[in-house]
Structure formats: structure tokens, C-alpha cells
Image: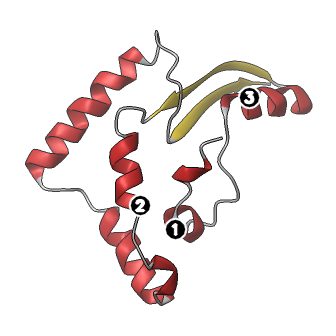
Amino acid sequence: MFQQFWSYNDDFARHLRRYTRSDFKAISERMGLKLLDSRYFMFFLSPLYLLSRMKPGFDKLSEEEKRKIVENQHKVPAAPLNAALTAVFGAETPLGHWLAFPWRTSVLGAFQK
């Protein structure tokens, strides 16, 4: 689900897959854990996230060039932009307790043994 969020950042971090809430449910059952909560986040910022990951010709760059792009994307942006992004993400966090976002860039799970 939503593999379009897979990016060279995932490759660089050596991620193996992107999980869904249903994946967390299946994993908890298979491992004998209780899934206390699972929710998607980064819903409001997902369009920006997608746009930031679309680098034409990225696959043709050297590993060093790719590493530099990834490092630059992980820097804190300029204060006004950072404040705006923080406000959007901060508004989403409490809403995520009451709304089930239909997609995300990330999923959070709380498990109990």
C-alpha cells in the first residue's frame, strides 16, 4: 500500500519495506503481541513529501551524489518554512487520535507483550 512513497531515502537507509496498519495487526498476531494502537501520520504533509522525493534522473547519479542529496533533505529548513511545517505536523498529531487518515507516509504502532 502506498509504495509510491518509497524513495531513495528508503534505499539509502536500507529499509526493506513500508508497513501498513494491517501489516502491524498481522505481525502482532503472528508474534503473540497485543496491538494497542496503530495510526498513520504525515498525512497533511504527504503531497510535499512525494514532491520532494521525485528527482528525475536520480537513478543515474553516483552514490556520492545521492548521499549528498539525502543529507541535504534531512537538514532543518529555514526558520519560516520550518515553523510552517511544524504547525501543520503539530495540528495533525492531535487530529490523528480522532480521525483515521486514509494514507500516510509513516505508520506508528504500539505493541504489548
Residue at 41% x, 73% y is 56
Q: Residues within 10 Å of mark 1 (few under 14, many from 20)?
A: some
Image coords of residue 21 (percent x, y): 67, 29
**Of marks 2 and 3, which one's residue comes earlier in the chain?**
3
- Horizontal and vertical percent position of residue 79: 10, 50
Q: Is residue 11 above or below residue 106?
A: below
List x then y, in percent, for residue 45: 34, 39
Q: Which mark is residue 19?
A: none
Please tell me in which quadrant of the rendered image residue 1 appears. top right
- Is the residue under label 2 in contact with that under label 1 (CB below 8 Å)? yes
Marks 1 and 2, how far apart at CA:
8 Å
**Where is 106 relative to 5, above or below?**
above
Q: Secondary structure at mark 3?
A: helix
Q: Residue at 16% of width from left, 38% of height from top?
A: 84
Name the residue beneath numbered marker 1. 8
In space, the residues marked 1 and 3 are separated at their CA atoms by: 24 Å
| Quadrant of the frame with the C terminus | top right
Few, some or many C-alpha atoms within 10 Å of disc 3 (few <14, some 14-19, many ≥20)?
A: few
Taking depth in this image into account, of 14 and 22 the one nearest to the observer is 22
Q: Which residue is mark 2?
A: 53
Label 2 vs label 3, nearer the camera: 2
Q: CA distance from mark 2 to mark 3?
A: 25 Å
Q: 80 or 34, which lies in front? A: 80
Q: Identify the amino acid type marked 3.
A: Ser
Is 91 left, or right, of 57 in this rendering?
left
Q: Is residue 46 depicted above or below 74 in this figure?
A: above
- Count of numbered tags: 3
Give whichever of discs 1 and 3 has the lower sequence position.
1
Which numbered disc covers residue 22? Answer: 3
